[in-house]
Image (cartoon, helix red, strand yellow):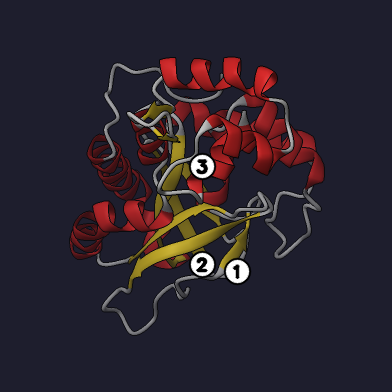
Amino acid sequence: MVDILELLAVSPDGLVLRDVSAQLEAPKSSLLPLLRALTARGYLAQGRAGEYRLGRSVVDLGAAVPTPNALMEAARPAVVDLMRRTGESVFLGTLSSDHTAIVLVDKVDSDHIIRYAGGVGDRRPLHATAIGKAILAFLPASERDGILKSLSLSRHTERTVTSLPALRASLEDVRKTGVCVTIEELVPGASAIAAPIFDRHGRVAGACAIGGPTDRVRPRLRALAAEVKATASALSVRLGHHADKKTGPA
């Protein structure tokens, strides 16, 4: 079925059964039941001349997956407001395509001279960042376990979590509280607080975080955590998530 969808994705004028058969080098008798099934489900549409094109369900399926750009566009006003309310740098991150790191997709710098730095497009380790652990904690269990087994858990500071049991315990805490706090786990003197952002299906789409010098962040942990969680919840709603929808690992 995937071969059929991929073929029709690059055939905007559509293809009739014989053309699909010729392109895929598959018998028409085998393709016809698949084409009918995909049409019945809305993944294909058939024209008057019998040609098949991609249907509405394919468009809906693609729209259901928030891209980093879509997440950034939805989040920009909220992350700017979060920086203004807290005075600290704010970051938006997603899981990298190879599932080995987080990627910063947006940031708003603090007005302070001394501030947490990071550039859009920068990669950061999953196990040593608040964004990384906020995302990991709410991935489906099977996906999370596969990622954890592949991580090197390299040490960046004396506070970096470098054992799998300790990391699993940390992620369990994040699931219970809905927020991740990292104190100097990646960079000495810098701390961060992150909360997950969910899409309309209850899947974790990314996380937003506040980052700053430890001596400014630590005294305000509770207040900053509340601000980050509120912003993440608001962004989740913008992506179509409902508070009563189950979130987190399946």
Q: Could you say which quadrant of the image residue 20 lies in? A: top right
Residue with the mark numbered 3: 8
Q: Could you say which quadrant of the image residue 32 lies in? A: top right
**Residue flagged by tag 2: what amino acid is it?**
Ala
Q: Observer-nearest residue: 33 or 187? A: 33
Tags 1 and 2 in contact by the CB under 8 Å rule? Answer: yes
Q: Which badge, 1 or 3, is on the more N-terminal residue? A: 3
In the structure shown, which secondary structural element does the residue marked by tag 3 occupy? Answer: helix
Task: Determine the residue positioned at 60% across, 69% down.
Answer: 187
In the structure shown, which secondary structural element does the residue marked by tag 1 occupy? Answer: loop
Q: CA distance from mark 1 to mark 3?
A: 49 Å
Decide: is 82 above or below 3.
below
Q: CA distance from mark 2 to mark 3?
A: 50 Å
Q: Which badge, 2 or 3, is on the more N-terminal residue? A: 3
Task: Determine the residue positioned at 70% across, 64% down.
Answer: 157
Q: Nearer the viewer, mark 2 or mark 3?
A: 3
Q: Position of residue 167 (x, y in %)?
A: 70, 39
Q: Mark 2 packing: few (<14 Cα in 10 Å), some, or many (20+)?
A: many
Q: Position of residue 108 (x, y in %)?
A: 31, 69
Q: CA distance from mark 1 to mark 2?
A: 6 Å
Instruction: Tell me if 72 is positioned left or right of 207 in this view.
Output: left
Residue with the mark numbered 1: 187
Decide: is 223 above or below 174.
below
Could you say which disc has been placed on residue 190 in the image? 2
Instruction: Kindly give the residue lying farthest to the bottom in the view shown.
Output: 113
